Amino acid sequence: MDTVVSQDGTPIVYEARGEGPALVLVGGAMTTGEHAAPLAGLLADSFTVVTYDRRGRGRSGDTRPYAVRREVEDLAEVIRAAGGPAALYGVSSGAALVLHAASAGLEVSLVALYEPPFTVGGADPSRREAYRSRLVALLAADDRGGAVELFMTHIGLPPGVIAGARQSPAWPGLEAVAPTLAYDDALLGDGAPPLDRLALVSVPALVMAGSASPPAMTEAARTVAEALPDGTYRELDGQTHDVAPEAVAAALREFLLP
């Protein structure tokens, strides 16, 4: 493991594997860099694959108050450590962070995204505001378990699955990163695809979704791809939001390698 220091003094821990063009993997909600290790292992024969703990997660530090620009600065330092420019692959809310970074002019060569969690069409804005208000209140009360449960409910997990998760060995780790749920929420803004920001992404981009994912997720991914100046949409057969590393690795190789 290695560490970079972001502009606000926050230590960000990362790990590099393999040799070749730099590829930084950016995780989504409730994950650390460790979750991307299987995918990194599959790609390390062709790329210098960098995984990292986003601020507030795992071994990285945190500095309050949170601001999206600080996460962009974190990623800029990771890219620099990787010898940039680098290709970026972001999953879920990590995809939203990648879009912030690419539109801000970081040293990004290519962009790949998996199911950026934007909402397209007639979403009820009051539902999103209610989630945000409740999340803020739970985190202010340091009710991390309540915040995790709220998030799981918000994304549509059934009560039985949530109850099982509470009893699983993974639950303490989820509670440990619960404050970063507010960070992921901030990355999504009002929840709609950020068309103005997407127009600023000048590099080629691949936007993926699983063919077995809910239609709202595939629609959002397709909308993002169409809004990017050089975007391509691709569905991965049989995949859901919990995408298999092997499926992503094959798509990334095809997109990133000449």
Image (cartoon, rainbow, N blue to C red):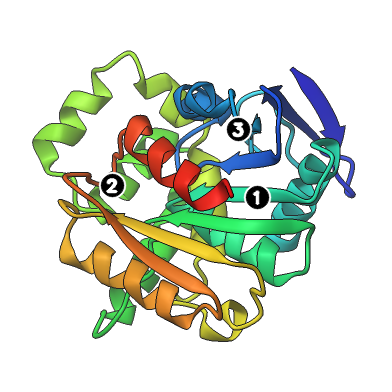
Q: Amino acid at mark 1?
A: Ala
Which kind of residue does numbered mark 3 sit on? Arg
Q: Mark 2 touching mark 3, by CB under 8 A?
A: no
255 vs 86, nearest the viewer: 255
Disc number for residue 57: 3
Q: x%, y% of residue 239?
A: 22, 44
Give above or below for 144 relative to 190.
above
The secondary element bearing badge 3 is classed as: loop
Residue visible at 71% across and 39% down in the picture: 22
**Of callouts 1 and 3, which one flags the residue occurring earlier in the amino acid sequence?**
3
Q: Say which quarter of the image contains residue 23.
A: top right
Q: Choose between 213 and 39: the one closer to the eye.
A: 39
Which secondary structure, mark 2?
Answer: loop
* Residue 141 visible to the viewer: no
Q: Measure the C-alpha gap from mark 2 to mark 3.
A: 21 Å
Who's the residue at 49% across and 42% down the image? 253
Q: Is residue 42 left or right of residue 210?
A: right
Query: Disc 2 designates what residue?
Result: 241
Q: Which residue is at a point 74% across and 33% down the rendered structure image?
A: 61
Secondary structure state at the residue bearing disc 1: strand
Q: CA distance from mark 1 to mark 3?
A: 22 Å
State the residue in front, 209 or 161: 209
Q: Where is mark 1, residue-wise?
A: 87
Q: CA distance from mark 1 to mark 2?
A: 21 Å
